[in-house]
Amino acid sequence: MDFNKKIAPPTGDVLALITSLSNPVNHEVHTHALKVRDSTLEASPHSYGSTCLQFGRVLACPSPDLISQNDIQTWSNSDGGVSVMQLRHDPVGGWSQLRQMAGLLLKNALTQPPMNKDTKSRMRLLPDAAQELKCILCQSIVDENDAVRRASSSIISSCTVGTGFATMDGMEALPLYEWGETILAPFLVNCLESAISIMEGSTASSATMEDKIKHALLGSLMTLTKLLEDDAAKFERGSGAAFNKIVPCLLKLLKLCGEQRIKTDALKCCVNMIEVMPGSLVAQMSDFLGVLSALGNDPSSQVRQLVCRAIVNLLSERSEYLQEHILSVSQFMLKSTSDTGEGVALEACEFWLTFASLDDHACTPTMTEAVESLFPQLLPTLVKGLVYPPEKIEEILESNAIDEHQGEDRLQDVAPVFHKSKTKGGGKEDNEGAEDDDDDDDDDELDDKEWCLRTCAAASLDGLSRGFSPEKVLPHLLPALQECLSHNDPWVREAGILALGAIADGCGSTLRQHMTQLHPYLMSQVTTNESLPQLKSISFWALGRYVFWAMEQASSGAQPELIRNLIDVVLSRILDKHRKVQVSACSVLGEIIEQTGEFAIPYLENIYRALVYAIDRQQTRALMVTLEIFGSIAEVVGPATGEGVFPTIYVPALLTMWANKAKQNPFDRTLLPLMESLASITMVIGMSYQPWALQTFDGALSIINSCMMILSCGEFTDEEADAIVCATDILDGLVEGLGANFAELVASSSQYGEHFLPVLGALTGHEVDGVRMSTFALFGDIAKHCPMVIQDGMTELLTEAIACIDPLTPSVCNNAVWAVGEVCVKCIGNPASLEAFASDIVEGLIILLVDSAYSGSPAAGLVENAASTMGRLAKVNPAFVAKDLQHFLNGWLDGCSKIYDPLERRDAFEGLMMAIQANPQSLGLTPERLSDTLNVLLFAVVSWHLPSGNMNPAILTSSAYQFVPFPQDHMDLCNNLRTFLHHLKDMAGAEWNEILRNMPVNVRKLFRDVYGFS
């Protein structure tokens, strides 16, 4: 390709179009320009390519003087000469902005191409247009204009390694294979080598030539940085031999060049190569490490920051290259952790966090010893990094003053709340889909919503304290902690308390001997009125981290009143004048309840009265946390929360707040934690909730009706439907809590009783996944506990559930499958009621089970529910599933082995046995399939004997397990399995003995002792 080829100037029409697109003030002109742009791009492949070329020619045109007068006149006529007049007023800046706009339009056109109406596929550049565009882009990345070089670099990266629409190999607008191995990478390398030659004092030393080469160097580095950042592996695959020249060039630049910009871009390239680790970097590793060492004291903090990032990436991805130098590297990173540049210190601190996460293969004993030898300096350095910097302290103090005097929470201070629908059935004990959000809670205590040195240092202390024994950590950490905790500066004390909490997981047990002094100290920090809000908050957080110790003291009788005292202190602060302290107190109360469980029952009355008093006085942040606690108490403590006077204290208060807020705004996000708690309470306390059941039922239906009516008036987001989801979950909680009595509840509602079934039907077809997910959970529970409620709408509800057995929406699919299974249970003995649906159910379940057998489960719990539902359908009538059994038998067996719930697993196996008996040929014990089928089947049987919660086949090869007996409640199934296995042995012949011989010793013993195989 001729990179010096003269590029034709752009036309006046495209200049007029770009000008109009750049002027959103004139709405009519701008809208018309958008239509013109879209129509020309969509018209045909030729028009698409021509339009892209015109954008490219504007980008590549260094001066408007190159454009013909006719085209200038056409441009001028488009807007009455305004643009041309503006250009004359600012010829350099105005033209540069136009070129940048052309680059943006070109990038969008290439990365988000319109559909080709003839081929029904995305537009592609024709070969001639693609070839000219490559030339344009290569010329533009060496342009004297920095903004043009930046735009061109971004286009090349996006269109070669793929971003936006084009992310797969070959789908890019200008894929690397079309450039060939002799164009892009060689061109970039040539730019680097030319600059290196100049630096080494070779030919062409004139100032003009040097400027041109410098522009080429900057543009090529910028392009390489983007290419390697976006997808280094793809760029390597498509660049051929030239790729191997990049690393040597980068290292030479880092040795020769003193300019910060060039050093930073070259370092960025090297950092982004570490993950793919090309052979050229491996070959130059000694030089690379030497360069990093030389740049470690560079005057530029940005360069030092990138040096640290490179070392962290090496440690994370290829630690073997640091093993020989680990002590000197660690010493350098220790020094850099105290660097005055915050970015440098943060990158260096990442080293310790990364080191703590290394596995035994990546971290040798020598490396461990090297880092451990630095603990006397490292651990105090990390503690020092926990102290807020002065500018942050100033910001926090201003926020404290606002927080103290402000009447309402500011909208920006309230974190968004998203409801998580619960998942039914599946293979885990607690499968409600809620992820651990402790880290989010910690953010409230740390006053840091972004990753910074303080948060990284805290995480590093946590990781190192868990990775090394307390005996190696505490001797060097305790003196630093003692100094902090006794310091006069409250911000230093705050940092010490953060460090104390950070090491709770790793060193908590060993710190027991010190907790008799530390625990009262923490209590004193939260009871002193003069304490900073941040000091109180972090003390509450630390108290939560050591609740286990307080629990031990109280339960052992050493300090029997300690939990009561702790709860009293917490309750005294849930209405603190600072809302941050309120939030922290509520958060630690939830932690106390979670860890103490039933031990907290004697204190529940005081807790409930304090919380009820607080919710009428708290603002949004603290209120939402407090409302969550009601649900947490119910889930952790259990049915005891419904005994005696307890529910009379808190249920009426929650219902009153619910009704008032829902009347004002049913979409109020404060309602979400309130309704989530009501859903938990109704389910947990069961019949004890009956006095308020009708009010709750009507309230939930009212929310659903109001929200659906409002949302039907226009477009809405999924989050806006969260209120519907929560209200549906409350109805589900009522079903699970009241059981069969839910039918009487529906009938007793004069306002919504007759409308319940139509509403349920509408919810199953709702467009928001979360709504359908919760609705199918409700449908399944009604089918399980009180099927008469839905009898009249069963056909429609079941049809909708079957239609949602689609792995593309796994959460909805999971609950739909589970609900269908519950319907099947109620149809056992009445196969005619399911005959019309059976084939569709089987067809949907097969997809899930076959996907599981060959490509892994599409979503956690989905294959288990599919296996259970298939078994339940087979128990209705084995003929429903027996015909196609051979096509999905292995997937069904795999799913059966993963089911956690014993009743669902029993149904799956019983249905499986019945289906096999109905179609023995489905076993397909042919030589090709025999081994796979037997292995999967035998593990499915063994799964009955695995420890609860661990259904992974890998456990069979470990020593950390012990088989459990077959459940006594299901011995009939055990006997049937024994008979079936002996029959299977006779059918398999010698292959059976060979497979059993290859099983682990304990498995062979299990089959001998339990199933009678010699």
Image: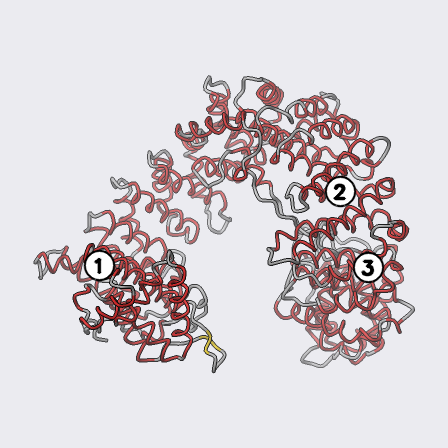
Q: Quadrant of the N terminus?
A: bottom left
Where residue 526 sits: x, y (%)? 59, 22
**Between 945 and 883, the one nearer to me in the picture:** 883
The mark closer to the camera, 1 or 3, is 1
Q: Are marks 2 and 3 in contact (CB under 8 Å)?
A: no
> Which mark, by number, is residue 757?
3
> Of label 2 and label 3, which has the lower sequence position?
2
Mark 3: few/some/many CA within 10 Å (<14, 14-19, 20+): some
Residue 857 x %, y %: 65, 64
What percent of the width, then of the height, locates residue 759?
77, 58
Distance from label 2 to label 3 (Cα)? Answer: 22 Å
Colour scheme employed for the rendering of this structure: secondary structure
Contact between marks 1 and 3 (CB within 8 A): the answer is: no
**Disc on res. 678:** 2
Between 911 and 630, which is closer to the camera in this rendering?
630
Q: Earlier in the sequence, mark 1 or mark 3?
A: 1
Of the two numbered discs 2 and 1 in the rendering, the one whose residue sits closer to the viewer: 1
The 10 Å Cα crowd at callout 2, few under 14, some 14 to 19, many 20 or more, is: many
Horizontal side, residue 464 vs residue 592: left or right: left
Q: Please state the total of marks drawn on the protein image.
A: 3
Q: Which residue is mark 1?
A: 85
- Side of 146 relative to 953 (left or right): left
Q: Secondary structure at mark 3?
A: helix
**Quarter of the image containing the C terminus?**
bottom right
Q: Is residue 34 above or below residue 271?
A: below
Marking on residue 613: none
* Rendering coords of residue 829 (x, y %): 92, 68
- Which amino acid type is marked by label 1? Met
Element under disc 1: helix
